[in-house]
Amino acid sequence: MKGTKTLLALLIVVGLCALTAGTAVAEPVGPYDVSFVTMRYDYPNPGYSTWYYTVTSTSGNAISHLVFELGACCNVEDAGLWVDFTTLISWWGTSKIDVTEDPTTGVFGIKFDEGFAEGETRNYYFTVEGNHAVEPDMITVAIKTGDLQGGLLMSSVDTTLGGSGDTVSGSIWGPNLECEETTAIALSSFSATSPSGPSASAWLIPVALLGVLVMAPASIVMAGRRQRL
């Protein structure tokens, strides 16, 4: 019985470690790299979730602004830049953040409205009300190209990249657009791989949770059988 309890505890710990592991999954959005790094449930307060992304503007391709698509039911509470997962630089309440349908890209969501130069990397976060389910290829990230003065650097973009004219877009991991809730796991600590370093796959999040949910009842059943023996 003691061994079974130990196994169950180990499975839960392993599952939680996988849930908190860095999952920087880069997707090409036109000539840019956009990575879903991870999300954190019940942070910074119970009933809220914070989502972490990294965007890299490649050589010769500056960014004017970008939009992360959100469901209309997602109430945005905060947004800005992250240094690490508990050091956040809020842009909320400034001209750098807007929750709207962006007229340039036609995408409704949270708009980070500050350009950055070619070759620059930024870590963006946003916090929404609710612990929403995470799904692959769920949200659209739309980017308006251009220099810091708004001049276009790309007069045309191949439509196969998901854009036209001076905008590009692509799909990436993100919150369910219908704001479907999921079971939150409170975390006392948090760590992740640097976005610039080696990264694991984002599917570790749902797989780890599934493993905990499946293995825990199995361990309990095994314990019951041993007691009867």
Image (cartoon, rainbow, N blue to C red):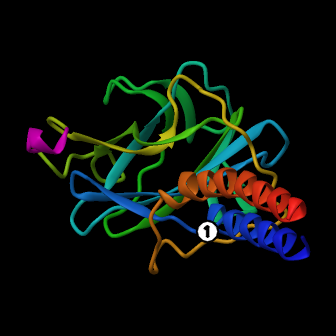
Check disc 1 and report its element: helix, strand or loop: loop
Residue 7 belongs to the span the image colors magenta:
no
Q: Nearer the viewer, residue 159 or 91?
A: 159
Is residue 71 depicted above or below 48 in this figure? above
Q: Position of residue 192 (x, y in %)?
A: 62, 71
Q: Nearer the viewer, residue 128 or 151?
A: 128
Q: Nearer the viewer, residue 4 or 38?
A: 4
Is residue 4 depicted above or below 182 in this figure? below
Q: Position of residue 165 (x, y in %)?
A: 14, 36
Q: Position of residue 32 (x, y in %)?
A: 28, 58
Please give left or right for residue 71 compared with residue 63 in the image: right
Q: Residue at x 69, y 37 (%)?
A: 131
Disc 1 crowd rating (10 Å Cα; few below 14, some 14-19, many 20+) is many
Q: Residue at x 88, y 59 (%)?
A: 228
Find the residue positioned furthest to the bottom: 197
Decide if residue 112 is in sight here.
no
Which quadrant would residue 120 be assigned to in this image? bottom left
The stretch in magenta equals: 156-162
Q: Position of residue 3 (x, y in %)?
A: 84, 76
Residue 157 belongs to the span the image colors magenta:
yes
Please give left or right for residue 190 compared with residue 26 in the image: right
Q: Which residue is mark 1?
A: 21
Please give left or right for residue 94 compared with residue 187 in the image: left
Q: Residue at x 22, y 57 (%)?
A: 31
Q: Quadrant of the C terminus?
A: bottom right
Find the residue positioned furthest to the top: 72
Circle 1: residue type: Ala
Which quadrant would residue 124 be assigned to in this image? bottom right
Q: Quadrant of the N terminus?
A: bottom right
Q: How many marks?
A: 1
Which quadrant would residue 101 be assigned to in this image? top left
